[in-house]
Image (spheres, rainbow, N blue to C red):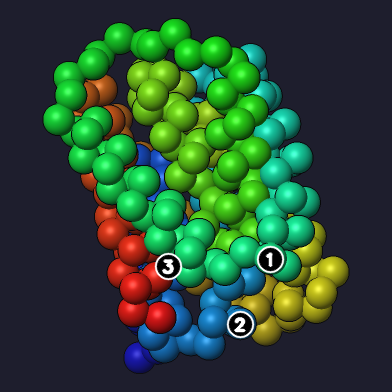
Amino acid sequence: MTDILIFFVVFLAAFTQGVVGFGFGLVTMALLPLFLSERFAIPFVAVYCLGVAALIAWQLRAHLDWRRAVPLLVGTALGVPLGVLALQVANPLHVKLVLGVTLILYSAWSLMTTVTREREIPVAWAYVAGAASGVLGAFNTGGPPAVVYTTLRNWDKDATKSTLQVVFVLTSIIQLTGFAWTGMMTADILLQNLIMAPAIILGVVLGHLLYKRIDQLTFKRALLAVLFVVGVVYVEKALTA
């Protein structure tokens, strides 16, 4: 029964990211710890985060503009070590509360606006967004700052989704390196990853099929809706811990 539940959660998470390019970690880490230990679930999910992002990035490789992605990637690489240092002094619950409130306010405001053209935002903000994602990655809350940046730029859906995937690939590689270094990654986890791989492939493929059928405005609204849900989850966890 547990294997069926894991398969369904992984499929649902992969389908979500296949549609909007974001949300795999949110769905899996919200549900898997209900029937798996968190110590097992975190590296288990990290492997799939890499796989899902890499698969989607490959699907959209023709739309990837490295000039857009590199500043975010540089910021992410610099931000991860800062996040590790921040873990020593910052309370993760306070981080989630502030981030959650920010995401709720931003996504709610954005959903009520109708901006459809690309905004001119200094490229320096890409480094800031990448660094923020890297820092928050140490708290297992990375990703939203990069998503916020792409929605502010109002890129087309292919540019947004492809750019986010390469950021997530880099973040996952850094995380998995750390897990391997500390011994959190075990043979049992990798075996379970292999067993559940069909759920990833099926979810991403079906999600991508739906993604191709939705227009730019629907895609942006769906992405903002996921950000809103992320914010609510972070606030709830911070207030009830």
Label number found at residue 28: 3
Which secondary structure lies at badge 3?
Answer: helix
Q: Amino acid at mark 3?
A: Thr
Q: Check the image and report above or below for 147 versus 89.
A: above
Near-viewer residue (88 or 11): 88
Near-viewer residue (184 or 98): 98
Q: Which residue is mark 1?
A: 89
CA gap, disc 3 to disc 1?
27 Å
Is residue 70 found left or right of 221 in the rendered image?
right
CA gap, disc 2 to disc 1?
22 Å
Label number found at residue 39: 2
Q: Residues within 10 Å of mark 3 (few under 14, many from 20)?
A: many
Which secondary structure lies at badge 1?
Answer: loop
Is residue 107 found left or right of 237 in the rendered image?
left
Label located before the other in sequence (3 or 2): 3
Q: Amino acid at mark 2?
A: Arg
User: Residue placed at 44% from the left, 27% from the top?
Assistant: 150
- Is residue 37 among what the camera can see? yes
User: Residue placed at 55% from the left, 67% from the top?
Assistant: 92
Is residue 164 found left or right of 11 in the rendered image?
right
Q: Residues within 10 Å of mark 2 (few under 14, many from 20)?
A: few
Q: Amino acid at mark 1?
A: Val
- Name the spot of residue 113 as percent of width and height, x first: 18, 24
User: Residue placed at 37% from the left, 55% from the top?
Assistant: 100
Question: Is disc 3 in contact with disc 1, using a CB cutoff of under 8 Å?
Answer: no
In this rendering, the label closer to the viewer, 3 or 1: 1
